[in-house]
Amino acid sequence: MHFDFEAFLTIVSLITGVLWLISFTFKKKNTQTEPEIVQEKSLLKNIIEQVGSFFPVLLFVLVVRTFIFEPFRIPSSSMMPTLLTGDFIYVNKFSYGLKMPVLHDTIIEVGHPKRGDIIVFRYPRDQSVDYIKRVVGLPGDKIRYDIRKKELYINGELMPQEYIGNYKGLMDEAKNASLIEKYEQLGDKKHLILTKNHAIGPTNFIDVTVPEGHYFAMGDNRDNSADSREWGFVPERNLVGRAVFIWMHWRTDHFFQGLKRIGTKLI
């Protein structure tokens, strides 16, 4: 467990909830004992009633943010060309089950990530940081990635790729120059990826088996993404939700071009 905005919101909601109940008790007591007499309220009673009045609003925000949806801003280029720096996305937190705030234990199971889903999760090495990647490997899958050829194998089967050409879309950073754009088929989902010629790692191949209760996630910008190839698997309890669509885009450069991304459904 770590202290973040969700933990802060939960604590504040609990405090205001207690004060709301106390103020309600005060009102009920005054109505029963002195129905026709208006007394001057004490300073403490005023403070309790004022602070407690925020409880319904805070509770509503907590319920929506914890169980239904949460907005996120994309901070990096690791999911190009699907997501760009400056995109604001809607994340469905109901997709993978109802979870307790702060503790993140699943209360009601609704579903599990499917291959190709774009997920938001708490970074395994630092729970206070949220990451967004695409699910490539499910529990039990054998993943092999050829770093030289940029080819992905799942359970011995090559995931088909279709060459498009040099990437000509919006560019986030200078390191994203000279990128190759392709389609990749992950099960029933066909999505865009970017690769970079001559980009290599410490080894030529990555061979892993995804353990139960975990997922293997990769960025669509394959050679500019720190993902499961580097830091390992995503535990199921770290899942925050599934990215659904872009509801806003804000960047100073290419401003109007970026606004066209609003409403884009994520696949």
Image (spheres, rainbow, N blue to C red):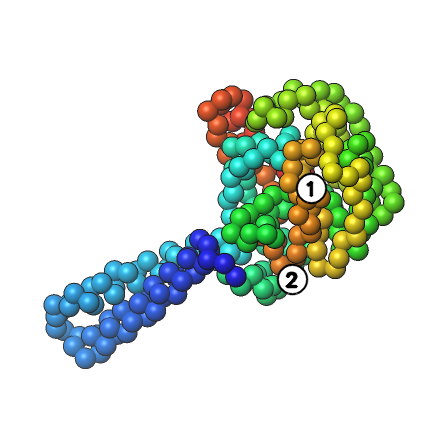
**Which residue is painted at 53% across and 48% down in the image?**
129
Measured Cα–Cα span from mark 1 to mark 2: 25 Å
**Which amino acid type is marked by label 1?**
Met
Discs 1, 2 touching: Cβ within 8 Å: no
Q: Position of residue 84 (x, y in %)?
A: 58, 31
Sort mark 2 into few (<14), some (14-19) or many (20+) by Cα contacts within 10 Å. Answer: few
- Where is residue 6? Give x, y as percent: 46, 56
What residue does disc 2 label?
109
Quadrant holding the C terminus:
top right
For marks 1 and 2, the one nearer the N-term is: 2
Total number of numbered discs in the rendering: 2
Query: Which residue is denoted by mark 1 in the rendering?
Result: 218
Q: Position of residue 90 (x, y in %)?
A: 55, 43
Above or below, 177 against 245 in this view is above
Amino acid at circle 2: Glu
Q: Nearer the viewer, residue 127 or 88?
A: 127
Which residue occupies the foreground of this view, 176 or 58? Answer: 176
At numbered mark 1, what does the secondary structure look like: helix, strand or loop? strand
Residue 59: x, y in percent?
41, 59
User: Where residue 5 is drawn, which disc sits there?
Assistant: none
Q: Is residue 110 visible?
A: yes
- Location of residue 51 (image quadrant): bottom left
Residue pictured at 60% horizontal, 43% vertical: 132
Residue 124 falls left or right of residue 161 = left
At 70% from the left and 55% from the top, the residue drawn is: 214
Instruction: Give the residue at x 63% y 32%.
Output: 80
Pointer 1: residues within 10 angstroms few (<14), some, or many (20+)?
many
